[in-house]
Image: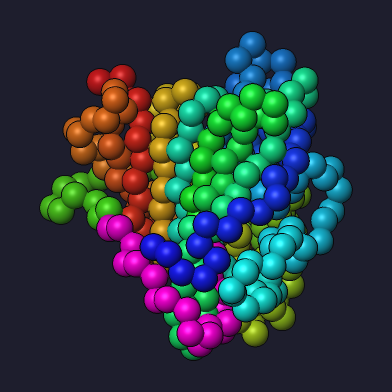
Amino acid sequence: MSGPGAGFEFKPKDVAWNKRDSLLFALSIGADIDELHFVFENSPNFQAFPTYANILPIKGTSQDVIDFGKSVISERIPGVPILKPNRIIDAHRAMTWYKPLPATSEGKAFELQTKVIGVYDKGKAGTVLEQETVLREKGSKEPYVKLVGSTFFIGQGNWGGPKGPSPASFPPPKDKRPDGVETHQTTSQSPLIYRLNGDYNPLHVTPSQGKSMGFGGAIMHGLFTYNIAAHAVLKNVGKSDPANLRHFSARFQAPVRPGDKLVTEIWRTGEFEDGFEEIRFVTRIEGGKVVLSNGRALVRTGV
């Protein structure tokens, strides 16, 4: 869909990560001693958890605390009002892998190339910014992973832009029990640890911003929940092997609060695409509402 800002490309952004970054990320999303290849640097198959790539657009090359607002939008998008990063939440995220993500960028130079897919005016509710980002080697431009994400800027709408397309729907199979269930108990420390990966949005620490946005206080990072679900799916049906994950996507449905227990229900469809089985999943708060909907993954299941 064309419209204001569509097709605009940001300047390429250098990114870098080390082994410690990979270890911290894996631990922050629930990897444990039974997955040494994610949590022990001397494992013969040590590698980064594949969804680590979704922290890089914010982290860049920094190894220190960064200014979250400046990391979200670095350039003005032509034809679009200035979007303020102090009132944003994730709306949707899809990732597609072309090559396994190494445990460290050392020895190679990596960059992100991001372009705007569309900027959608949702009226009083706000504005949705949809972008495509490719993590690639700087010299060869060889791609490793593509991220397509939508960010919702609360209360920043009514500027006359297009409403945008209706999102695709990937519901779980009807009248079928899940083929697998994985749980994760969050704590008050969960957002404090996860933010050390590079996502320093104060919404996830101090209660004041969450209250002003109608959440009643601090909430978990949306991408924390997304990564928890990715870990659940890969471990449950993909043998915890990053090479078995081709695609992973979900829609952010509701906030998660520190202390909530997350339950990810997983369905195998029996449908295959280039040897990868289509998986549907839903993540909910135990005994409560759905927080990730329209979950879809392509996983090599070994069937």
Where's the C terminus, which quadrant? Answer: top left
Where's the N terminus, which quadrant? Answer: bottom left
Place of residue 90 in the rendered image (x, y in percent of width and height, measured from the top left): 53, 63
The magenta segment: 151-169
Q: Nearer the viewer, residue 119 or 247?
A: 119
Q: Residue at x 69, y 38 (%)?
A: 111
**Left-right relation of 163 to 12:** left
In magenta segment, residue 227: no
Q: Is residue 202 visible in this depiction of the protein?
A: yes
Q: Is residue 36 visible in this depiction of the protein?
A: no
**Left-right relation of 124 to 20:** left
Place of residue 11 in the rendered image (x, y in percent of width and height, measured from the top left): 70, 50
Looking at the picture, does residue 44 appear above or below residue 8? above
Q: Which of 75 and 215 is in front in this view?
A: 75
Q: Which of 282 and 273 is in front in this view?
A: 273
Looking at the picture, does residue 147 appear above or below residue 221? above
Q: Residue at x 27, y 30 (%)?
A: 273
Q: Residue at x 55, y 25 (%)?
A: 100
Place of residue 38 in the rendered image (x, y in percent of width and height, measured from the top left): 62, 27
Q: Looking at the magenta stretch, what is its main secondary structure? A: loop
